[in-house]
Amino acid sequence: MVSVLNSVDTGHEDLIHSAEVDYYGLRLATCSSDHTVKVFDIKGGNHRQIAELRSHCGPVWQVAWAHPRFGNILASCSYDRKVIVWKEADEWGKCYEYGNHDSSVNSVAWAPPEHGLILACGSSDGTISILTCNTAQDTWEAKRIPNAHTIGCNSVSWCPAALPDASFDQSGGKSGAPVKRLVSGGCDNFVKIWREDGDRWIEESRLELHTDWVRDVAWAPNIGLPQTQIASCSQDKRVIVWSSDNYVNWTPTVLNVFDDVVWNVSWSATGNILAVSGGDNNITLWKENNDRQWVCISNDSTQPLANNGGEKNL
């Protein structure tokens, strides 16, 4: 059973939609319907607010930390149609703002650091934006995947850049540099996998099994094994784990059918434990056993969870 090690009184004045710990587990970023992003120092089991970031003019749905090799950088997205990248120098401030979406921006995710400082953004306008920073010149370039999801895109997540360990790689070590891929989930009930092909992004696979809006997708970290896994959750109350060893043929496994809509899925750093949270106010942890069956290893009843998706596509 998982126990609570620490709690943080954020002081937000409305629902909290996202809470993310940085790479080293020393800082916590939160965002809320009160239009703010807050950053806390959480070293040593204590917490201290070190920044309150105000530039959004609508509910802020998600925050995401960049890899520390690029410095202390945080991205946020909002119902106000904007994506903001924040950076800490002497103090926290806005270093880039992207406002070319036509509707709420629901999800932001940083690419693996091996690819550079790249941010994917999913919006209710149905498009996905890929924002790339030229760190030498401190400039940003934006590309778009138009019509990625009918009605809207709810979540994006990147494929790990790690290649299979040589002892598992059956390609004879000829796999080359890792290809940029990401997965998205949307209001068309689809999970889609996108691959960079030159100057454009193409739909590589379309995974069809959910029967209602896909609320979240999460690509599992890769520890060098040849198999890759993606978790998806939906308003159909199901969590599905998709597995593949070639990025083309995907095998779905229904992890569980829950009592209410499932809002979020998140992998552990080693990719072998999946956390699930939803409208039943529970956070459950799942692990695949030796018989390739997913079993619940922890069930924690929590305070009512913020609606992490229902308001985004109004």
Image (cartoon, rainbow, N blue to C red):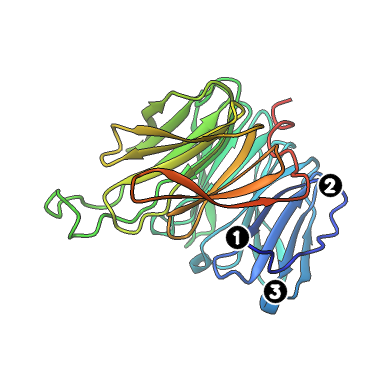
Please tell me whether mark 1 or mark 3 is closer to you in this view: 1
Disc 1, SS: loop
- Does residue 199 appear in the picture of this structure? no
Q: Is residue 144 left or right of residue 262?
A: left
Residue pointed to by mark 3: 90
- Residues tagged 1 and 2 counted as in contact (Cβ below 8 A): no
N-terminal of the pair, mark 2 or mark 3, is 2
Q: Is residue 221 left or right of residue 20?
A: left
In which quadrant will I find the C terminus? top right
Q: Which mark is residue 75?
A: none
Disc 3, SS: loop
Q: Residue at x 52, y 32 (%)?
A: 185
- Residues tagged 1 and 3 counted as in contact (Cβ below 8 A): no
Q: Residue at x 40, y 26 (%)?
A: 206
Instruction: Tell me the distance, in whole angstroms, between the alpha carbons under discs 1 and 3.
Output: 41 Å
Instruction: Tell me the distance, in whole angstroms, between the alpha carbons under discs 2 and 3.
Output: 26 Å
Residue pointed to by mark 1: 1
- The amino acid marked with disc number 3 is Asp
Q: Residue at x 73, y 63 (%)?
A: 39
- The amino acid marked with disc number 2 is Asp
Residue pointed to by mark 2: 34
Q: Residue at x 30, y 38 (%)?
A: 247
In which quadrant will I find the N terminus? bottom right
Q: Quadrant of residue 15?
A: top right
